[in-house]
Image: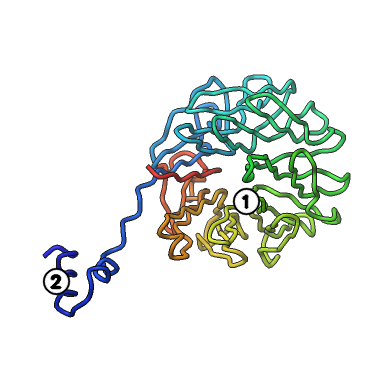
Amino acid sequence: MHTNAWILALVSAVGLSPMVADELSPPPLKPAVNVFAAGCRQGDQGWEAALWINGNGIKLGGDAMESQAWAMTVDGADVYLAGYGAFGHGRQACYWKNGHLHQLDTGSPHSEATGIAAKGGEVYIVGFMSDGAHPRATLWRSGHPVQHLTDGTRDAKATGIALDREGVPVISGWQSNGTHSVATLWRMGSATPLADGTLSTSASAICVDSFDCYLAGSTSPTVGQSRATGWKNTSGTSLSNGLNKAHADAVDFANGVAFRAGEDGRKAVYWRGQQQIPLTDGTRQAHAAAIVVFRTPLDSALGRDGDVYVGGSVNNGSNVEAVYWKNGIMIRLTDGQKASAITSLCVRIQ
């Protein structure tokens, strides 16, 4: 007998209403999703920017001798990656739209794109440009630099970007105070330091919930040591205990909680709030570089987190291998014969 018919027969026998029968029906299945993973893999001439969709490698265009993708976003049917390409005269910031390579207007011998956001076809990219002296944190819009976030007198890099509820870019990164790097949040071009500058700090990633900014990064009390650190707006919290070198490199926000991903010692980990959840056992080096929490309307109605996707890499004994985890279960994207890694993830309903 079909499950629903069996339930109706049962509730009819005990005198329950059809409404109760509906409540006893099996919950709807989760929608099918597309998992987009960006990063790099070893090619014939060096690293090559890479894109996987549902585990299938997608060929990216361009004639760069070497390239890497550091960030990704999906806007409607368009898939954007941001990174760099080496064209014989140094690394140049670039992005890919649906696999087609576009070099960014830089006017400098060395530049890289490290974060990307898009809305309604408008593309915002952050990174840095360098003339050989000090890198300058930079924001591009539609391929052209619209703002240098720093003046170039000291080192600075932008690392991530998100759009707030009104579509205003907010940017993570760091800038030097002459002695230490200082984690920094930029909003509408205005810089807000996230630390007092007595220790080296860096913000590696950012996401936004309405107007609140959540960042992931690290604090280094001594040379060679670091603690994973999370910020909500300008308030910072240590995520690791300082026993191992640790850092957080990605952040997402869901169900009222910030989720961050990174590494602690040799382990790939993520944090739900301040609770650390290991993805590997530390036998071999592993790293988590991206995190997405995918929630369905049912998850929201029931107050559940949803599915947690984490992207990164593991050492398989021969190479660094691109993998991602769904709710802690590892999924391989290559055969592991050549080095590869994931740097960014997006999950969308099919």
Task: Please provide percent x and percent y for residue 279.
Answer: 50, 60
Residue at left offset 58%, top offset 65%: 276
Residue 261 as seen in the image, left or right of residue 150: left
User: Please, what secondary structure does the residue beneath circle 1 have?
Assistant: loop
* Residue beneath disc 2: 9
Residue at left offset 68%, top offset 29%: 140
Q: Say which of 173 and 185 sits in front.
A: 185
Labelled disc at residue 210: 1
Residue occupying the far left of the picture:
1
Quadrant where the C terminus sits is top left
Coloration of the structure image: rainbow
Q: Is residue 91 above or below residue 181?
A: above
Quadrant where the N terminus sits is bottom left
Task: Please provide percent x and percent y for residue 236.
Answer: 73, 60
Amino acid at the residue labelled 1:
Ser
Task: Please provide percent x and percent y for residue 120.
Answer: 54, 32
Q: Say which of 169 and 93 sits in front.
A: 169
User: Please, what secondary structure does the residue beneath circle 2 have?
Assistant: helix
Labelled disc at residue 228: none
Residue at left offset 67%, top offset 47%: 204
Task: Please provide percent x and percent y for residue 337.
Answer: 43, 40
Gap between marks 1 and 2 measured at Cα: 47 Å
